[in-house]
Image (cartoon, rainbow, N blue to C red):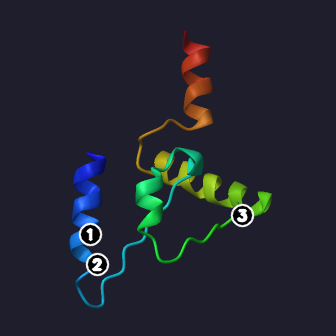
Amino acid sequence: VVNALLTQLDKLKHQKNVLVMSTSNLTKAIDSAYMDRADIIQYVGLPPREAIYSILSSCIKELMRAGIIATLVSVLAVMRVS
């Protein structure tokens, strides 16, 4: 898979106005051949704790709204019935 990706990246280098962006939270595991093909390597640190909380909170609220995960109230109600 890595060789196929590298081959496609090499083909893209000859194209005009192409931007390839990638992210990873496992920077030590990125293949060095992939990194060698990058023109710009930029490290972006973690957001502040408040931002992390806000992101997680909004994701959990959306999952509850969509019915993918139960609300605490419904979990407690089921526990009382059992």
Residue 75 placement (x, y as % from top left) = 57, 27
- Mark carried by residue 10: 1
Residue 20, quarter of picture? bottom left
Residue 74, quarter of picture? top right
The residue positioned 58% from the left and 47% from the top of the image is 28
Q: Are marks 2 and 1 in contact (CB under 8 Å)?
A: yes
Which of the two discs, 1 and 3, labels the residue nearer the N terminus?
Answer: 1
Left or right of 6 on screen, residue 27: right
Q: Can you tell which of label 2 and label 3 is closer to the viewer?
A: 2
Above/below status of 34 relative to 78: below
Q: Secondary structure at mark 2?
A: loop
Q: Nearer the viewer, residue 34 or 26?
A: 34
Left or right of 40 on screen, residue 50: right
Residue 52 placement (x, y as % from top left) = 69, 57
- Mark carried by residue 47: 3
Residue kind at label 2, given as amino acid type: Lys
- Mark carried by residue 13: 2
The local crowd at label 3, few if under 14, some if 14 to 19, many if 20 or more residues have their Cα within 10 Å, is few
